[in-house]
Image (cartoon, rainbow, N blue to C red):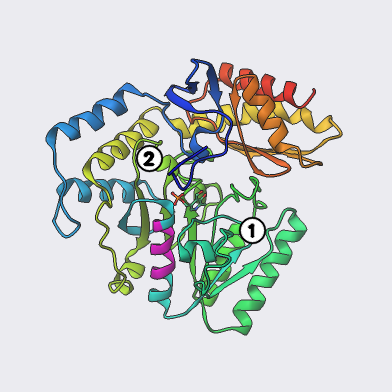
Amino acid sequence: MAKHLADYGSAPVDFIRGEGSYLFDAKGKKYLDFQTGWCVGTVGWKNPEMAEAICAQAREGLHVPPWFRVQRHEDFATRLIELAPGKLNRVFRACSGSEAVEFAIKCARMTTGKSQIVTIGGVYHGHTYGAAALGNASTSGMEPNVTGFIKLPLPKTDTEAEQTITAFEDLLKSRKDIAAFMSEPVWTNAGCFIPSATFYSTIENLCRKYGVLLVMDEVATCMGRCGELFGSQLWGIEPDIITLGKSFTGGYATMAATLVTEHVFKKSTGVPYNSTFGWALQDLAAVEKNVELIIRDDLSKNAKEVGAYLLELLKPLESLKKIRQVRGVGMVLAIEFRLPISALIAAQCYRNGLVTEFTDASTLFLTPMLNLTKKEAEMGANIIKKACGA
Ligand SMILES: Cc1ncc(COP(=O)(O)O)c(C=O)c1O
């Protein structure tokens, strides 16, 4: 029990170190990590190249406030722009996914001079006031909240996707105050729901037709997590704004980013951007190296292939009565139960040496390392199958 820490976790294990795809607890027990910090792990814990990059920058010793020019910031922003889809051309420095989302909301409103952001309900976008109001983080008892978010139902089937699209077009036809459509390329933390094949291209066409911005919160889907470097590339869309976090850092830094087009940047000059620690140089050294390794080792491809293999291993669980669906894309997977047993299954996995997560009472959530091996996928799948009684 925590005595002084406000946010002490409730999970049953205290981990003390990691290595590759494994975590170790205080008693030395080894666990295969299929959670990796919730969509964060990429190149493995205790990666020597990551450690060296961070130490090398620490030995240089430099921290400057955000209004000083640092060539390394500029160079990394250029690298991100080279990698990003579409016409994104400018980068805001941020420390967390929530902060990146705040930038995106502010830029969308500032660019269009309109207040309303249409989003998909039931999705988490962060804990700060704007991000919480956009998403489903509770601010109950802390009102007044940030307003100006219109929530459409999360579509779980092709028919529901059509209904959500129709509802969006109805809004666009009937209101003149819509700034943007903003959501995730894959609804990760809502339980890994994957949009229908044409959902986002249709949403993008509507955004273009009615002159509203398309904003993708890629905090959880970026840097290979979904089998493409950016989740937006799954759908061939070109967002006006993208947020990055989580796998962007591989768990080695508190760093995030918001990428915008030149048009959005030019219209967003009044958006406050001074962040004391935004891209602090030790964080930057880690993220630069993480991105370099993801590309050098083609970890998007590994995430696509080994993720598909893991999905194939788990799919037969659908023949069990208690399981509604097994779904996934790249290294984001979920097992949805017909009963509220996800915590029980996760606890059983812990006992057998596997760390998993759950997004709600009936959905187990898996986000392994991007460099997971097929052998590790088999080990993890076997533990999950056993926990499910297969
Ligand atoms: C889609 C999405 N956006 C934003 C956030 C907030 O990121 P952070 O926890 O780094 O503030 C999260 C975190 O879970 C997320 O999943």
Q: Earlier in the sequence, mark 2 or mark 1?
A: 1
Question: Which disc is residue 249 wearing?
Answer: 2
Task: Report the amino acid beneath label 2.
Answer: Thr
Q: Is residue 197 above or below residue 179?
A: above
Considering only vertical position in the picture, is 38 above or below 368? below
Report the residue at 35% width, 44% height from top: 254
Q: Can you tell which quarter of the image residue 299 is in?
A: top left
Asked whether the viewer can see residue 68, the reply is yes
Check disc 1: other Cα within 10 Å, few if <14, some if 14-19, many if 20+. Answer: some
Residue 121 in the image: state x and y as whole percent.
Answer: 63, 62
* Residue range corresponding to the magenta coloring: 99-107
Q: Is residue 374 left or right of residue 243?
A: right
Considering the numbered disc 2 on the image, is that residue within a helix, a strand or a loop?
Answer: loop
Q: Residue furthest right?
A: 321
SS majority, magenta: helix
Tell me residue 46's x, y (percent): 37, 24
- Of the 4 image quadrants, the one containing the C terminus is top right
Check mark 1 vs ligand 1: CB closer than 8 Å? yes or no. Answer: no
Query: Which element type, helix, strand or loop, lies under badge 1?
Result: loop
> Does the magenta-highlighted stretch encompass residue 232?
no
Residue 233 horizontal/vertical position (percent): 50, 48
Instruction: Please state which amino acid type lies under the numbered disc 1.
Output: Gly
Residue 25 position within the rendered picture, expressed as x and y whole percent measured from the top left: 49, 22
Q: Which mark is residue 122?
A: 1
Direction from residue 258 to residue 282 in the image, left or right: left
In the image, what residue occupies the spot 55% across and 21% down?
A: 31
Horizontal side of residue 149 vs 297, given as left or right: right
Count of numbered circles in the view: 2
Nearer to me, 84 or 59: 59
- Res 304 → quadrant: top right
Residue pushed farthest front? 3
- Mark-to-mark CA distance, 2 and 1: 26 Å
